[in-house]
Image: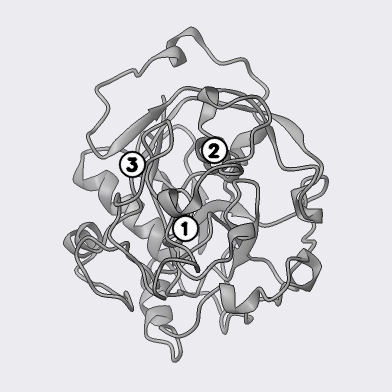
Amino acid sequence: MKVPGFLFLGILLASAGYAEGTLDTKMQTPSVREKAPEPAPSRTIPVPEVPRQEQAQEEPSQEEDHALEPVPEHLVWVQGGVFQMGNSAGEEDEKPAHEVRIRSFMIGKTEVSQQEYQALMRDNPSRFKGEALPVEQVSWYDAVEYCNKLSQKEGLRPVYIWRDDTLHADAAANGYRLPSEAEWEYAAREGKLAPAGAVYPEGRDLSSLAWYAENSDNKTHEVAMKVPNSLGLYDMIGNVWEWCGDWYGGYETEASVAFSQPVRVIRGGGWNSKAQYLRSSYRHGGDPSKGYSDLGFRVLRSAL
């Protein structure tokens, strides 16, 4: 039975076991086809009709070469461009490397903190408590609701709309949303500032860039404590994985290549991730109705 509107979220938050588990406990092997599927949701999940941003074929307009309005302090302007998404030397779901055109956007300088989430949602489901720590144990639906509430707070037009028990995305809205998988990878690779084909952060000192299995002491850490990438974005790798807007699927087809039922894309690795899971092209998925202690999100606004 489908549950209309965001009442669906309240039921999920109250479900048993919501606060348990991490994503990396399910990744004992680097083979994508051996990744364990996430537990099947106990209720029917509406399928949002969210457009895949990376499939846009139009050339970026002249206006996209600069911000169309003052960029809020908590966001970073990312100029659009073309890049090679994926990794021909990576796992099967990272192949093939393919050209993707990205439109300019503004993205969160950091992962959403517990202070930010608590102020807006009047709730903090995180396992590791601390105002400046990234919020975690939030489901994909929680993240979507946060985006809409932040849009409303700032007088912007919300992106996500529930209609007939189905979640739709308004491509013309100027409000907050989750990044598409392609937008996330473009930002993680440092956009137009990165050398062609570079797979961030290979060849760099991971300990200066990320909280991960080798240095995290098995917990999250305050956002923006590590060195940002060249765009000024903190924690694009490590600390917590980040929800993306897309359903997980292969690059050549829409069919899943690693999971037994539909899951949402997550990117970036977390506090308990091994180094190989931190590269910008690495892909994983999570049940959108579940929350994990190594999974959070950051927000994005399109350049409209």
The reply to whether residue 32 is visible in this rendering is yes
Give the crowd class for mark 2: few <14, some 14-19, many >=20 residues within 10 Å. many
Give the crowd class for mark 3: few <14, some 14-19, many >=20 residues within 10 Å. many
Looking at the picture, which amino acid does disc 1 mark? Gly
Mark 3 vs mark 1, foreground winner is 1
Task: Give the quarter of the figure containing the N terminus.
Answer: bottom right
Instruction: Using the rendered view, name the quadrant where residue 216 is placed.
Output: bottom left
Residue carrying label 2? 183
Residue carrying label 1? 238
Mark 2 vs mark 1, foreground winner is 1
Near-viewer residue (178 or 10) = 178
Residue 70 horizontal/vertical position (percent): 24, 22
Please give left or right for residue 281 compared with residue 260 in the image: left
N-term-proximal mark, 2 vs 1: 2
Residue carrying label 3? 109
Residue 106 horizontal/vertical position (percent): 38, 32
